[in-house]
Image (cartoon, rainbow, N blue to C red):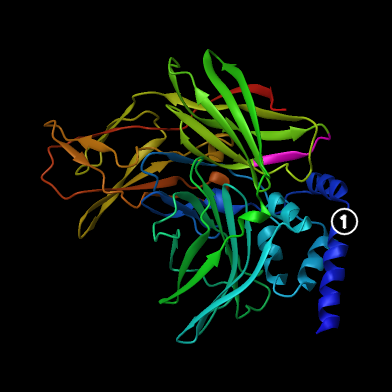
């Protein structure tokens, strides 16, 4: 037992001896061989104020009632072979190497022993859920866990989840799950490795514990997960920026940045006098004085108020300088309409001729409208759009108003490379409509290319 503990200490020490700076530079120079489908394939299921992401499924659901979620296509950053080899030797963590290697921040966190090891288990009817560890700071919570049981393999996906705070309330967060199976050429294993990744809105306190519930092959399993706040107490740097970006007459203000071990949160606000709707920045990154790059993956909020971008963290690298750089911004016209006759299929008004009505499917409680967004260029494909506003309304030709049935969010499906149209699904109630139906458009493809460079610190 002592020998095993000594071996673990040696492995951790060896991991800490990795030249972090050299590893970062190597990661930047490596060719991107795999796409991070978590961000391309989108948010799988939204529930009230919660949004979750899957790296496997080609779908998107936005479930934030008061905010939109931006998704950007990024590439996997591969860890060095020596780091991966060390991780595989640490008991309980070998199966997570493939999961965390796509997130430079988590690699850096583990490299700096910024993890709360756990071994908490729930077993029911032959199924087993084990929480192996927690990585957390003020605003981000990552839960590493495994699932086992009849019919479970490393390619199994969970069917549902609940993540509750100590009061039994759903966490208000962007919640991603990142399950990945082995390469198809390899034999499937009997353990499912996964992690949940929750980013909280500013002002939402990190719970002292969370009630982690997963539905696996029809069986609900539950683990009560404590969060040790002492591990990240005081690890936070707040920076007032207040720099203005102007793009073709449109003004954005980078207001502030907050640097923590697991993310850099940059708050951006659009000028209320802007004539265009701002939907996000193009290829936005943070860059330090050594050329190290920290990419962004999600954003929360609404540019009518403010948008908060979540970048990979520079915390452990401790750069002297940090700049926000981007190639421009996604922008579209405001107050555009989409007018369709859902009986004949005729589209009489659309903000873009590439957005068309595909048809509808009847369900018990309503009709699911299918809209296609085709022929997007390389830049336009980098963002998932909130086409119709979540919990929005529409009118028929008589002027009567109806509400979209999207309490769990709106689903989007698309495929890598953009060869097939992105398909949007919106549910409407069954009613005796006077055709056509008129929908107000929230976002659609459009952008301004103009270099952005703002000093953060």
Picture residue at 66% right of the left edge, 79% below the top: 187
Q: Nearer the viewer, residue 425 or 127?
A: 127
Name the quadrant of the C terminus. Answer: top right
Picture residue at 34% right of the left edge, 26% below the top: 336
Please identify the quarter of the rendering in which residue 231 is found. bottom right
Query: Hey, which residue is sitting farthest bottom in the picture?
Result: 126
- Looking at the rendering, the stretch of residues picked out in magenta corresponds to 290-295
- Residue 96 drawn above or below residue 5: above
Is residue 60 visible to us here? Answer: no
Describe the element under mark 1 as helix, strand or loop.
loop
Name the quadrant of the N terminus. Answer: bottom right
Query: Hey, which residue is sitting farthest top in the picture?
Result: 249
Q: Nearer the viewer, residue 230 or 146?
A: 230
Picture residue at 62% right of the left edge, 32% below the top: 257
- The x, y position of residue 432, in whole percent, is 10, 45
- The x, y position of residue 32, in whole percent, is 73, 49
* Residue that carries the numbered disc 1 in the rendered image: 18
Please identify the quarter of the rendering in which residue 293 is found. top right
- The x, y position of residue 139, in whole percent, is 57, 47
Q: Nearer the viewer, residue 128 or 363?
A: 128
Q: Is residue 46 left or right of residue 314?
A: left
Q: Nearer the viewer, residue 164 or 34?
A: 164
């Amino acid at each position: 037992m002592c020998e095993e503990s000594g071996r673990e200490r040696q492995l951790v020490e060896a991991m800490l001896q990795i030249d972090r700076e050299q590893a970062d530079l190597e990661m930047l120079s490596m060719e991107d061989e795999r796409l991070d489908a978590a961000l391309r394939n989108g948010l799988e299921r939204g529930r009230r104020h919660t949004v979750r992401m899957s790296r496997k499924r080609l779908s998107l659901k936005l479930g934030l009632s008061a905010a939109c979620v931006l998704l950007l296509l990024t590439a996997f950053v591969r860890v060095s072979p020596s780091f991966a080899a060390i991780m595989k030797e640490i008991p309980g963590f070998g199966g997570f190497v493939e999961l965390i290697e796509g997130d430079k921040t988590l690699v850096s966190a583990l490299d700096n022993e910024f993890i709360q090891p756990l071994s908490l288990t729930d077993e029911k009817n032959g199924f087993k859920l084990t929480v192996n560890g927690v990585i957390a700071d003020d605003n981000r919570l990552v839960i590493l866990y495994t699932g086992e049981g009849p019919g479970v393999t490393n390619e199994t996906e969970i069917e549902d989840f609940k993540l509750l705070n100590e009061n039994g309330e759903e966490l208000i967060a962007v919640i991603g799950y990142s399950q990945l199976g082995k390469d198809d050429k390899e034999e499937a294993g009997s353990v499912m490795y996964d992690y949940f990744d929750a980013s909280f809105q500013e002002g939402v306190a990190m719970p002292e514990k969370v009630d982690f519930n997963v539905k696996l092959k029809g069986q609900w399993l539950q683990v009560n997960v404590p969060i040790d706040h002492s591990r990240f107490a005081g690890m936070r740097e707040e920076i007032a920026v207040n720099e203005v970006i102007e793009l073709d007459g449109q003004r954005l203000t980078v207001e502030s940045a907050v640097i923590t071990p697991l993310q850099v949160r940059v708050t951006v606000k659009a000028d209320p006098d802007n004539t265009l709707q701002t939907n996000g920045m193009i290829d936005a990154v943070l860059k330090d004085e050594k050329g190290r790059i920290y990419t962004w993956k999600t954003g929360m909020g609404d540019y009518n108020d403010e948008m908060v971008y979540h970048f990979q963290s520079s915390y452990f690298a401790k750069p002297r300088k940090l700049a926000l750089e981007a190639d421009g911004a996604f922008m579209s016209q405001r107050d555009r309409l989409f007018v369709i006759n859902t009986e004949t299929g005729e589209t009489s008004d659309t903000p873009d001729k590439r957005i068309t009505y595909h048809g509808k499917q009847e369900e018990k409680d309503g009709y699911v409208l299918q809209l296609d967004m085709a022929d997007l260029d390389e830049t336009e494909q980098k963002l998932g759009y909130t086409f119709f506003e979540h919990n929005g309304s529409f009118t028929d030709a008589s002027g009567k108003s109806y509400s979209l049935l999207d309490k769990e969010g709106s689903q989007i499906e698309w495929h890598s490379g953009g060869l097939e149209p992105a398909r949007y699904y919106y549910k409407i109630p069954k009613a005796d409509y006077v055709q056509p139906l008129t929908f107000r458009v929230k976002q659609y493809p459009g952008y301004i290319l103009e270099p952005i460079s703002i000093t953060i610190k």
